[in-house]
Each structure stands twice: as C-alpha cells, then as structure tokens.
Amino acid sequence: MAPFRSTLNSAYLWTRVLIRTHPGPFIGGAFAVTGALTGSLLLVLESRAGRREAAKDLSTKFEHLDQKIVHLDQKTDTIEKTIQEMKKALEDNKRIAFTTAHLTMTALSGNKKPMQQFLADIEKCIKSGRKDCGVTTA
C-alpha cells in the first residue's frame, strides 16, 4: 500500500504544482465542464417543459373532443326523436288511408254513417292539435 500512497501523493503534488504554474487550461476546463453541465441541465429542463406543454395541449384536445362527442350525442338523440315522430306520423297516415278506403267502400254500398263518424273524428283530432286522434271504425 505504501508504494501506491507515494504514487498518489506525488500525483497530487504534481497536479498542485501544475495548477499553480499553468492555471489557464484548468480554468478553461472548469468552464467547459460547467458549460456542458449547464447546457445539459437546460436541455433536460426544456424537454420536461415541452412534455408538460404537450400534455396540457393533449388534455385540451381531449376535452374538446369530449365536448364534440356530447354535442353529437345530443344531435343523435334529436334525430332519433325525429325518426320516431316520423314513424308515428307514417303509421297514422297509413291507418287513415286504409280506414278511408274501407269506409269509402262501405259508403258506396249505401251505409254512409261510418264515413260521417270518421270525418267527425278527424275534424276533432285536427282541432285538438293531434292530441285526441282515436279513430273509430264501424
């Protein structure tokens, strides 16, 4: 261990003498190391800030997409309600057309009372704003 210690001791003394006699390269090296470390630190901090900004931007985009999805769901509900109303109106019109055809055939054979009752029911339905549209048939 003694030879190693003496070598270490002489290296220390040699480095001390070198720094005292030629300080320029050591100071320049220190600045280079400090600059490299500072630059690396800034790059790391910038990349972290960039990731934070990207995460914020992504979360904002997801919130915007969520709002659009809710808006589309509302539109879909409105369209489905409109389709149901149209189906009901179509069924009502079919029922009226078939009932009218049946009652017309009955009226042609001489019995006009069911047709008159049907027309009165239709008139009552129109006056009630389509709330009371029960059609009676003979």
Image: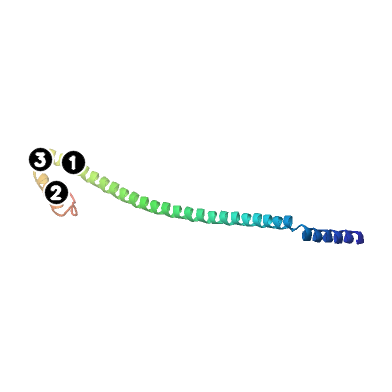
Q: Secondary structure at mark 2?
A: helix
Q: Secondary structure at mark 3?
A: helix
The residue located at (65%, 54%) in the rendering is: 36
Mark 1 touches mark 2? (CB < 8 Å): no
Q: Residues within 10 Å of mark 3 (few under 14, many from 20)?
A: some
Q: Amino acid at mark 3?
A: Ala
The residue located at (62%, 54%) in the rendering is: 39
Q: Earlier along the polypeptide chain: callout 1 or callout 2? A: 1
User: Which is closer to the viewer, label 2 or label 3?
Assistant: 2
- Colour scheme employed for the rendering of this structure: rainbow
Q: Which quadrant of the structure image shows residue 45?
A: bottom right
Q: CA distance from mark 3 to mark 1?
A: 15 Å
Residue 47 is labelled as: none
Q: Amino acid at mark 1?
A: Ala
User: Which is closer to the viewer, label 3 or label 1?
Assistant: 1
Residue 98 x/y as whole percent: 19, 41
Q: Which residue is mark 2?
A: 122
Q: Which residue is mark 1?
A: 97
Q: Which residue is mark 3?
A: 107
